[in-house]
Amino acid sequence: LAKTTQPISMDSYEGQEVNITCSHNNIATNDYITWYQQFPSQGPRFIIQGYKTKVTNEVASLFIPADRKSSTLSLPRVSLSDTAVYYCLVGPFSGGYNKLIFGAGTRLAVHP
Amino acid sequence: KAGVTQTPRYLIKTRGQQVTLSCSPISGHRSVSWYQQTPGQGLQFLFEYFSETQRNKGNFPGRFSGRQFSNSRSEMNVSTLELGDSALYLCASSLAESGGALGKETQYFGPGTRLLVL
């Protein structure tokens, strides 16, 4: 599985856009990039998944450059409720390999 | 559609006892995975079950075991509990659809069972 590197923590203010970048230099051809959000004492919640270019849903956008060695999760206009830990995962999430390897994640603190 | 449910939500046990945790996956999901989360080690994969068979296993001692039933519900058991087993135990389910798009398998997590070993 490709190892990921992301910042340990980030601070932001309500209403700002937050971009969290994840490095995955040895990503494999069949690897997808997935982001999860976790609040204290809760299970991680799936945010977004992508393979290349840009993916957008109602919660976030995911930008993946052509070389796929990094990815950026973009959270538009954050609120206090976006304070959480964000995990970037890279792997072949196909049937037969549902073994997610979580790193330390990025602890995002949103301030008033 | 109902999400992943886990019971019980909270549990207190003493050293040496055993515990069984239960997980009901999202309807139609065939794969169930278990994870342990502690402040020191973070989120760690325990094992995964698919069609009542364990097909992936993490690096945990044999005291940790699990099983899956024909309706995809899963249980995990920890025997001879140690203080270090105190953790949030999370269950996640996914479709594991054969023939599905390679690499596109999202796991959905339950709220977890908080286990405290005294």
Image: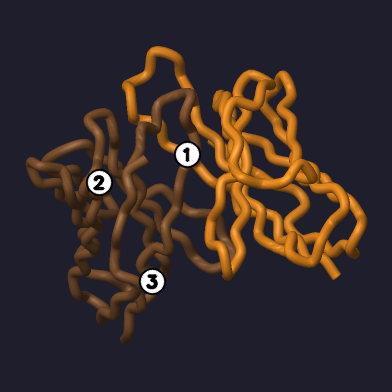
**Looking at the image, is A91 positioned above or below residue B18?**
above
Marks counted in the figure total 3
- In this view, which residue lies farthest toward the bottom? A112
| Mark 3 closeness class: few <14, some 14–19, many ≥20 residues within 10 Å | some
Tag in front: 3 or 2: 3
Assign the C terminus of chain B to one quadrant of the image.
bottom right
Q: How crowded is mark 1: few (under 14 residues within 10 Å), some or many (20 or more)?
A: many
Residue at 56% from the left image edge and 46% from the top image edge: B45
Q: Is residue B95 left or right of residue A48?
A: right
**Marked residue chain, label 3:** A
- Where disc 2 sits, the SS reads loop
Q: Which mark is residue A46?
A: none
Which mark identifies residue B107? 1
Q: Which amino acid does label 1 sit on?
A: Gln
Q: Mark 3 points at which residue?
A: A107
Residue placed most toward the observer, A82 or B15 = B15
Residue A54: % across, % down: 14, 44
How far is the residue under mark 1 from the one under mark 2? 17 Å
> Judging from the image, what is the letter of the chain drawn in orange?
B
Residue in the image at 35% along x and 72% along y: A8
Q: Residues within 10 Å of mark 2 (few under 14, many from 20)?
A: few
Chain with brown colouring: A
Residue occupying image coordinates x 46% and y 19%: B97
Q: Can residue A97 be seen in this view?
A: yes
Q: Where is residue A43 in the image (x, y as percent from the top left)?
A: 55, 55
For disc 1, the chain is B
Q: Name the residue under label 2.
A: A57
With respect to residue B46, does A105 lie above or below?
A: below
